[in-house]
Amino acid sequence: MAERSDGLTGLGRFAPALRGALRVVYPPQCLTCETPVSEEGTLCPACWPDVPFIHGLACDKCGIPLPGESATPVLCDDCLAIARPWGRGRAVLLYGGGARRLVLGLKYGDRHDVAAAAGRWLARAARPLLREGSLIAPVPLHWWRLFRRRYNQAALLSAALAAHTGATHLPDLLVRRRHTGNQDGRSRADRFSNLQGAITVRGGRASRIEGRHVLLVDDVMTSGATFAATAEACFAAGADSVDVIALARVGRADTA
């Protein structure tokens, strides 16, 4: 069959029309409610105020919003007191309200469309962290939790971020070698103790990150214990530098 000059052959030529027809039958909806919106992966006017995006001054290590302004990077009180093995950190949303609904939908509700939309938001927040040759990798799930959930929400986010930035994505870089259970309800000290040594670089992947910059991605940062264990695993395998980014950052009052 002759190839069309526009590069579309067979059913491919009908794809735009098919997408248009589907949008008539199933119009795009707001990410947090069922209100129709003009573009997929967006929020309706009523939901925007309930999704707290992080703007302005934020901690350079953990991304939590801070009052005031500064022309130079600043750290929050927690990051001044707690050793953070990574270099810099960012977060897109402050966990709560509509942000909590987005995260829970992504994590437990098969809402892959949230990850697709979050890729754009993460790309903007990650711009100061990325450099030439950066590698992007998700925080891993234990195999049993992955089996039960069927997907790793952090890997969906990291894939979307890589797609929007063009950086190399290593979705299987890390492995959680023991089940660490749920961190909810644990004290900060217990969270760090529970994750100690639980994450490592997958066999055969160390050569991929040796001497490289790695950007780690997760859905939520609470105490930073998971990011700390993951960053330490990257450094142990020879990474030159490690930064972190989360879709949502839990407020300080909820991290103790």
Image (spheres, rainbow, N blue to C red):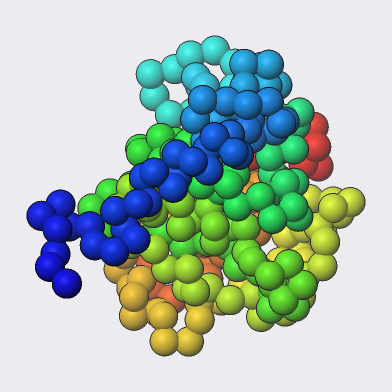
Report which quarter residue 190 is drawn in: bottom right
Considering every residue shown, the one lying at the far front of the view is: 1
Residue 159, relative to residue 149: is it above or below? above
Q: How many numbered tags mark residues here?
A: 0
Residue 64 percent coordinates (x, y):
61, 32
Residue 44, relative to residue 151: is it above or below? above
Q: Nearer the viewer, residue 21 or 135?
A: 21
Residue 13 percent coordinates (x, y):
29, 53
Left or right? Give the position of 127 relative to 38.
Answer: left
Q: Nearer the viewer, residue 167 or 183?
A: 167
Considering every residue shown, the one lying at the far bottom of the view is: 203
Q: Nearer the viewer, residue 112 or 198?
A: 112
What residue is rendered at 49% in x and 74% in y?
172
What residue is rendered at 34% in x and 61% in y?
11
Residue 198 percent coordinates (x, y):
67, 74
Determine if residue 115 is in view.
yes
Q: Nearer the viewer, residue 195 or 116?
A: 116
Left or right? Give the position of 98 relative to 237.
Answer: right
Considering every residue shown, the one lying at the far top of the view is: 68
Residue 9 percent coordinates (x, y):
24, 62
- Work out which quarter of the rendered image holds the C terminus and state it: top right
Considering every residue shown, the one lying at the far right of the view is: 185
Residue 71, relative to residue 84: is it above or below? above
Left or right? Give the position of 70 relative to 141.
Answer: left
Determine if residue 93 is in view.
no
Residue 1, relative to residue 17: is it above or below? below
What residue is rendered at 63% in x and 26% in y?
36
- Work out which quarter of the rendered image holds the N terminus and state it: bottom left
Left or right? Give the position of 235 relative to 175.
Answer: left
What residue is rendered at 62% in x and 64% in y?
152
